[in-house]
Image (cartoon, grey):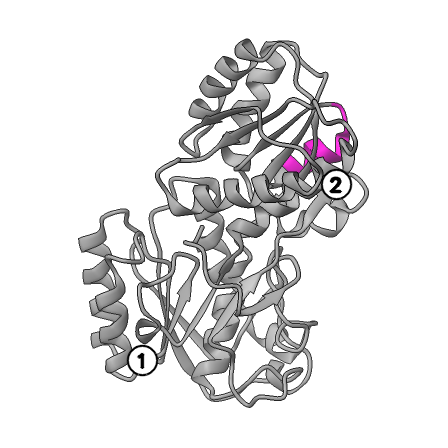
Amino acid sequence: MAAQLGRRGILLGGAVIGASALAACTSNEVAGGQQTSGTKVAAGDNGKPGAHITIGFSCPQADHGWIAAITKNAAAQAKLYSDVTFSPVEPTNDVAKQIAAIETLINKKVSVLVVLPNDGKQLTAIGRKAMDAGIPVVNLDRIFDTPLAYRTWIGGDNYGMGVSAGTYIGEKLKGKKDAVIAEVAGIDSLPLTQERSQGFKDALSRYGLKVTNRVAAQFTSSSGQQVTSNLLQAAPKIDALWNHDDDQGVGVLAAIKQANRNEFLMVGGAGSTDAMQVIKADNTPLKATVTYSPSMASSAISLARLIGQKKGMSDLVENEVPARITLASATITKENVDQYLALGFKS
């Protein structure tokens, strides 16, 4: 859930990184371990074992389904490579403890660091310290304050999530100028929430539509249920609802069921397995979700390996891994859900 990045980085479809870098099973996978959901090993030369490297990894504590999947995916991806030693530090939500943990990885002289910071701004200095020590940093999702603190940034597209959700709803309600459109946002003070809402607003405006009822939750199931209950009481009839986050969406759906409401269509956010299974069953208002997949952690490990081995992404002309990679937000519906289930996470 990154702060908005300039949209000049590489934009990749869904959460799947360039096919050259991460395409099909190879000898590395066979040597490194069992391929699991949300992981891939490249075909071609990039998939073959190379120089042995150690990848240090640090992220927040898994108190949210999305973060838990980040940790799981990073470890699973590293396990696929026989030429990678994975060196994670204890996850923590304490900024000072995360800085100290990364300091230990710098002192160990790991080959490459992959860091999802609790707060990009507060961990910028430690990112710069690693880079100054000659350790390339792959900054995952929450971006550091300066490019001097990372070799490559990879993350999702918060503004794009809003655009995808708004476009789906706009197409469904095209021509209905008086449509009642509700929004259940995440934590309103966070830039990522503001970016998602702005993208939603901009996409709806292309159809002459706007948000009429908006509440903000806390990215938790309980807060989602509470604010949605209030929303439903205030709006006796709704045409469409976008919920920013599938973890809080568990509570949103509970509130909808409790209120016995089904006159509208709902779109989720992130792409949890739970949400996708509901979409596939097609027996609730939830008809789609827009991706912000934690499989980006798998991609970050693969990028770190390429950087550590001084390789590029073979479908690109350049010899090096790009400096910034923004993952596109795909729209998952009943029609294409089977293509995305392997990338889902447990809410």
Out of 147 and 101, give the one closest to the viewer.
Answer: 147
Q: Is residue 318 visible?
A: yes
Q: Residue at x 60, y 9 (%)?
A: 259
Q: Is residue 227 magenta?
A: no
Of all residues, the one furthest to the right in this rendering is 335
Q: Residue at x 22, y 48 (%)?
A: 94
* Quarter occupied by residue 194: top left
| Amino acid type of the residue tagged 2 in the rendering | Thr
Element under label 2? strand
Q: Residue at x 57, y 24 (%)?
A: 212
The secondary structure that most of the magenta stretch takes on is helix
Q: Residues within 10 Å of mark 2 (few under 14, many from 20)?
A: many
> Residue 256 location in percent, x, y?
60, 17
**Which label's residue is closer to the chain start, 1 or 2?**
1
Q: Is residue 281 magenta?
A: yes
Is 117 displayed left or right of 107 in the figure? right
Q: Which residues are magenta?
A: 275-283
> Does 287 sit above or below residue 150?
above
> Does 285 sit above or below residue 295?
above
Out of 331 and 178, give the one closest to the viewer.
Answer: 178
The residue carrying mark 2 is: 333
| Amino acid type of the residue tagged 1 in the rendering | Ile
Element under label 1? loop
Residue 135, disc: 1
> Residue 200 location in percent, x, y?
58, 41
